[in-house]
Image (cartoon, rainbow, N blue to C red):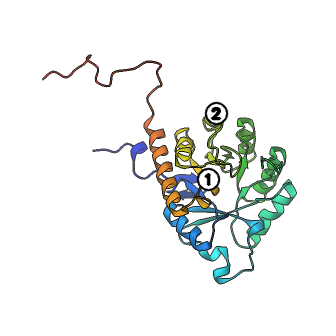
Amino acid sequence: MTIEPSMSPADPLLIADRVFQSRLVVGTGKYSSFAVMRAAHEASGTEMVTVAVPRVNLAARGADSLLEWIDRTKIFLLPNTAGCYTADEAVRTARLAREAGLSNWIKLEVIGDEATLFPDTEELLAATRTLVKEGFVVLPYTNDDPIACRKLEDAGAAAVMPLGAPIGSGLGIQNANNLRIIKAQSRVPVIVDAGVGTASDAAIAMELGADAVLMNTAIAAADDPARMARAMKLAVEAGRLASLAGRIPKKMYASASSPLAGKIQT
């Protein structure tokens, strides 16, 4: 039997020049210990984790270093510019990450408001343009705004990362239609970032057509992070399969599951 490409067990995610088998990206903050973080990473099956450059002690060594608890033979490191409020600050942070040998990839965050942590799209776009020119692979975290995502893509972003809800809120996907539009218009991968609270939120994001989901708090702050990480892994996989399979249309009225028309005669 020939397996159609869309149903193949191999369903890689391509971002820039890298291929990932897992479509779940996770963070490294808020865990009760580095050991708990590592167990959650293993349970999630992730192949990419994001690290906040301003919050990492690059001078730390051994068990005191967060980086020592990440198996970089299996997991790709994605530095991020969390805590930056201007384009200049974000660019400096990205350069620091590259100079420290972390990566020339950067999850670009430029926050515009302390209460909501919503991105400042004007500053974000300026930082994206600068970093792309400097050879960075830029993955910008942005609002669920199709216009902003299109401009970031035009500026050279390797992927766009619209929020599902405010960072750490656990509210789930708040604007499903915008995410559908972003995916329909995008020529680069769409990674839903922020707002996921539980496994069903991750599945919904993938069912909407997202190429991947990034989360941190939903796993790190769960009562059992490793178990939640496993749940998120399965949810992302299930949502991806459902998206590829194509759901039935919604109807106002019932439709018999065993219709008389076309009934097989015995």
> What's the residue at 78%, 66% (across, down)?
54
Q: In the current view of this chain or complex, which residue is farthest to the bottom?
A: 62
Q: Quadrant of the N terminus?
A: top left
Task: Look at the image and tell me whether residue 97 can be seen.
Answer: yes
Q: Nearer the viewer, mark 2 or mark 1?
A: 1
Q: Quadrant of the C terminus?
A: top left
Picture coordinates of residue 38, whole percent (x, y): 56, 70
> What's the residue at 79%, 65% (across, down)?
95
Badge 1: few (under 14), some or many (20 or more) residues near its Cα, within 10 Å? many
Q: Earlier in the sequence, mark 2 or mark 1?
A: 2
Tell me the kind of residue under disc 2: Ile
* In this view, 178 is above or below 97: above
Tag 1 secondary structure: strand
User: Considering depth in this image, is 30 or 5 the residue closer to the camera?
Assistant: 30
Q: Position of 48 compared to 237: left or right?
A: right
Tell me the kind of residue under disc 1: Leu
Q: Position of 91 compared to 160: left or right?
A: right
Badge 2: few (under 14), some or many (20 or more) residues near its Cα, within 10 Å? some
Q: Position of 42 compared to 103: left or right?
A: left
The circle drawn on residue 251 is none
**Residue pointed to by mark 1:** 214
Q: In the current view of this chain or complex, which residue is farthest to the front?
A: 223
**Residue pointed to by mark 2:** 181
Picture coordinates of residue 50, whole percent (x, y): 65, 62
Task: Look at the image and tell me whether residue 45 can be seen.
Answer: no
State the image quarter where residue 3 is shown. Answer: top left
* In this view, 79 is above or below 164: below
State the image quarter where residue 209 is shown. Answer: top right
